[in-house]
Amino acid sequence: MAVRDPEATKARIFEAAVTEFARHGIAGARIDRIAAEAKANKQLIYAYFGNKAELFAIVLERKMLDLAESVPIDPDDVESWVDRLMDYHAAHPELLRLLFWEGLEYGTGALPHEGERQEHYVRKVALLRDGQERGVITDAIPAGDLLFLLTALANWTAVVPQMRRILVGEETDDRARLRASVKEAARRLVAR
């Protein structure tokens, strides 16, 4: 008889859910496909993670925490932060897909776990505000707006690769030039 390992099962379910939600969104995702990929039964998914919407919220929350830990915002070196952010999303395209599916599914409505998300962003905005107060970045743009603009600038190339290819090109030199342009735009956006 096989020994059960609940933590390994949860990890397999989580990874299968990341893939499923990134491909199909909340409405299109199927718990039976997640169960099959994770080699777990559906009842375990519900027992460990709750319903499908709750599972999606947990998946997105953990992926965003990974981003926050991997690429902390640095108001003293915004260009380097943008560089690391672009690298992260190139290596982990599923996070932006999950965020876009969330936007399509919920629109401007309240999100599951929204309070925790707001707390997460309050800390990031506070770091930019600290940079503004120390005079290392502009205070002409409110810190929350600045964070929104910088992340949009850095993330858009990964979100719409077809437009990047059409407008910029697909050669290595084209991508390098665009990255340099994004970093220059970020530098100018935060300049005092």
Image (tube, rainbow, N blue to C red):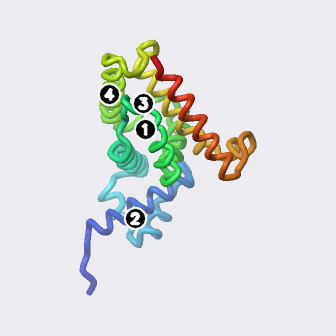
Q: CA distance from mark 1 to mark 2?
A: 40 Å
What residue would you read off at disc 1?
A: 81
Q: Nearer the viewer, residue 32 or 113?
A: 113
Q: Residue furthest right?
A: 166
Residue 51 in sight in this render: yes
Q: Name the residue tied to disc 2.
A: 42
**Rendered view: 109 above or below 44:** above
Closest to the camera, between mark 1 and mark 2, is: 1
Looking at the rendered image, the disc whose residue lies closer to the viewer, 4 or 2, is: 4
Which residue: 50% across, 64% down? 33
Q: Residue 110 — which label?
A: 3
Q: Position of residue 112 (x, y in %)?
A: 38, 38
Residue neighbourhood size for the residue with mark 2, other residues' Cα within 10 Å, grouped as few (<14), some (14–19), many (≥20): some
User: Disc 4 designates what residue?
Assistant: 127
Amino acid marked by disc 2: Lys
Q: Vertically, is 7 above or below 161? A: below
Could you say whether the residue bearing mark 1 is in a helix, strand or loop? helix
User: Is disc 3 in contact with disc 1, using a CB cutoff of under 8 Å?
Assistant: no
Distance in Å between CA atoms under marks 4 and 2: 42 Å
